[in-house]
Image (cartoon, rainbow, N blue to C red):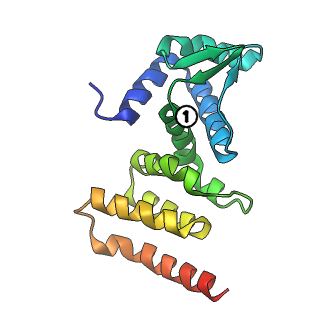
Amino acid sequence: MPRDVIELYGRIFGDALQDAQQRLLEERAFESTSQRKQFHLESRVPNDSELIKQLNQTGFLIADKGTCQFSHQSVVTYLSAKHFAREWKQLLSKPDLIVDRNWADVLEMTCDLLTQVSDILDMLSLLSQKHQDLALQLLSRFTAAHPGLEEKALVPFWEHFSKSFFRISRA
């Protein structure tokens, strides 16, 4: 029995898709999330058609007039978070990437996917340059979920955040 939604979706998509297909799906889900667009697959597009065939066995697709969507937004969130967890350094370094509150669920799940505390704190540090409130919200959630986390592990984050905050508030 899966412990959480990440483990559940990981098993389902791991069984349904090959690695390259899953990475393509994750990238497309992230792209739709970052552009605030509804994620869908089109049956007349060759790559999408193959993905639809593979994903039909999951029970997560809803077909409507040649397009398919996932039955729940948490599936798109999971796929987006998988992509973001793998590419967060490059993505957050892009000057044209706009992060807003619509990213909250993806970023929260990304924190759950990352396994190293240092990666989570580094990601939140970079995120604070794009959206400080969201970074602080995620840090608060993360520290609450990890009560044994030593305060010294948080010092580099707070130092970076303080410098960023001071620089932005002076502007």
Q: What is the quadrant of the C terminus in the image? A: bottom right
* Percent x, y of residue 80: 56, 40
Depth order, front residue of 16/132: 132
User: In the visual, does 107 lie left or right of 149?
Assistant: right
Q: Is residue 157 above or below residue 140?
A: below
Residue 48: image quadrant is top right
Q: Residue at x 55, y 16 (%)?
A: 55
**Outermost residue toward the left?**
148
Circle 1 — which element?
Answer: helix
Type of the residue with mark 1: Val
Q: Is residue 130 above or below residue 102?
A: below
Q: What is the quadrant of the N terminus in the image? A: top left
Q: Residue at x 49, y 37 (%)?
A: 78
Residue 42: image quadrant is top right
* Percent x, y of residue 65: 71, 13
Q: Is residue 53 above or below residue 69?
A: above
Q: Residue at x 50, y 17 (%)?
A: 16
Q: Which residue is mark 1?
A: 76
User: In the visual, does 90 lie left or right of 112?
Assistant: right
| Disc 1 residue crowd, few under 14, some 14–19, many 20+, Cα 10 Å | many
* Percent x, y of residue 35: 70, 45
